[in-house]
Amino acid sequence: MWSTVSSTPGQSELVRQSWSRSAAHRVDPAGRPGRTQLSPDELHNRRAHSPLTDLIPIARALLLGENARDGDALVALGDADGTLLWVEGDHDLRDAAESMSFMPGTDWSEAAVGTSAPGTALALERPVRVHHGEHFASAAKSWSCLAVPLRDPETGTVLGVLDLTDRTGDIRTHGERLLIATAYALQQELLVRRLREKAATPHRSAPVLAPDATPSGTPSLDVLGRDLGVLRGPTGKARLSARHAEILTLLAWHPQGLTAERLADLLYERKAPLVTLRAEIVRLRRVLAEVGISTLATRPYRLDPELDTDVRRVLCLLDRGAHRRALSAFTGDVLPSSRAPGILTIREQVRERLRESLLTGAAVEPLLEFARGPHGIDDLEIWRMCLHLLPACSPRRAGVLREINRITRELDSQVRV
């Protein structure tokens, strides 16, 4: 059941695969792990929305019940992207672990720190143990760790990772069965809570949130995968015309503002008189007022306050290395039918940011998801990276090779023509 990342005979292939993936992600073994650090507010928000919320006391009690007094082990819970959300245990040991950035808010995915129990367990979706020098990062080589993925008890989807870490390596002898039993207990706790919630409201529909206003009044704009944008303000919601969606998207992309001339250049395929743009702005102001957004500044045109767009949220997730969440939030191209020059540029930049972020930092699962979608299905480089990151024993390699061969044949036929 356990995959040992080790250089001992019989296990060297697994460590070579993990180290090869780490090198492909351009992880610096001499650098300090945890290249991505959440701010306190981001960590609080991530914890609050995690399906693993409130499970850490159970994990701590089961895993550190006897060890906590001696301070020889830490227990950690991370999300499906590899970000550590909770790290519990002896205070002095936690301080020592922070020297390698093993602390809440840091990214411990394989793409971020290389071979480690939590990151490699998520990459392989199975239990993993890593001992001392088997770590890819030099800063982690004096530590040993065990980790097991945590799954949704109903769907089997990976929700996060449970990790047990120490400095002595003693956990290798007594911690493996305990860690798997604890993971099972946590998953059953999730199931029990879910059943209780369903039983508490057996004949009531789920509460419907009023679609007419945004939480806390924050103005937002959704333009991914839709031709008519949806604008939400403090007092309501509006479905925008194609032109109004283009204008707001351009202004949100350029928060410093745009002159009337520049906005017109980005908006119209053919040169149009400024009076045409100004007429659209007048009509747009009425729509903004209907949803409680009263300020569209002029000279230059700019939004005050700025809009929280679904485009910005995807890019922020990519910047944090949350590739699975970014893919889930990326519901399609920016205003896919728009031919406005500025929108075409934004659309291409968002596509390229998504692709490059996945190629340089994502684990194999998000890459495969992207490869099977409309933007990756014919991308030879994406499929080759999937093949490179998949373990040699993975049965999915055959399907990836078929796609690589298909694309190669199509490219060859185009060259011959």
Image: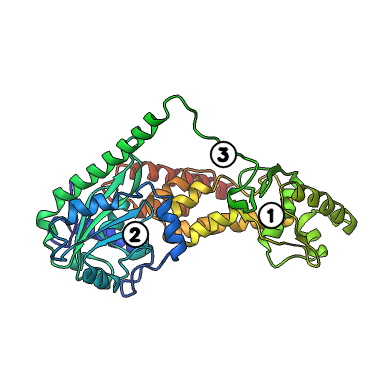
Mark in front: 3 vs 2: 3
Above or below, 320 relative to 199:
below
| Colour convention | rainbow
Q: Amino acid at mark 1?
A: Thr
Q: Are marks 1 and 2 in contact (CB under 8 Å)?
A: no
Query: Looking at the picture, how far across and down is residue 268, in whole percent?
Result: 80, 54
Q: Residue furthest front?
A: 200
Mark 1 lies on residue? 249
Above or below, 383 relative to 110:
above
Query: Looking at the picture, how far across and down is residue 69, in whole percent?
Result: 14, 63
Q: Residue furthest left?
A: 173
Query: Looking at the picture, how far across and down is residue 86, in whole percent?
Result: 32, 58
Q: Is residue 108 visible?
A: yes
Q: CA distance from mark 1 to mark 2?
A: 34 Å
Left or right: 404, with 228 as reference point: left
Mark 2 lies on residue? 84
Sooner in the amino-acid sequence: mark 3 or mark 2: 2
Nearer-the-camera pick, 186 or 311: 186
Q: Is residue 376 visible?
A: no
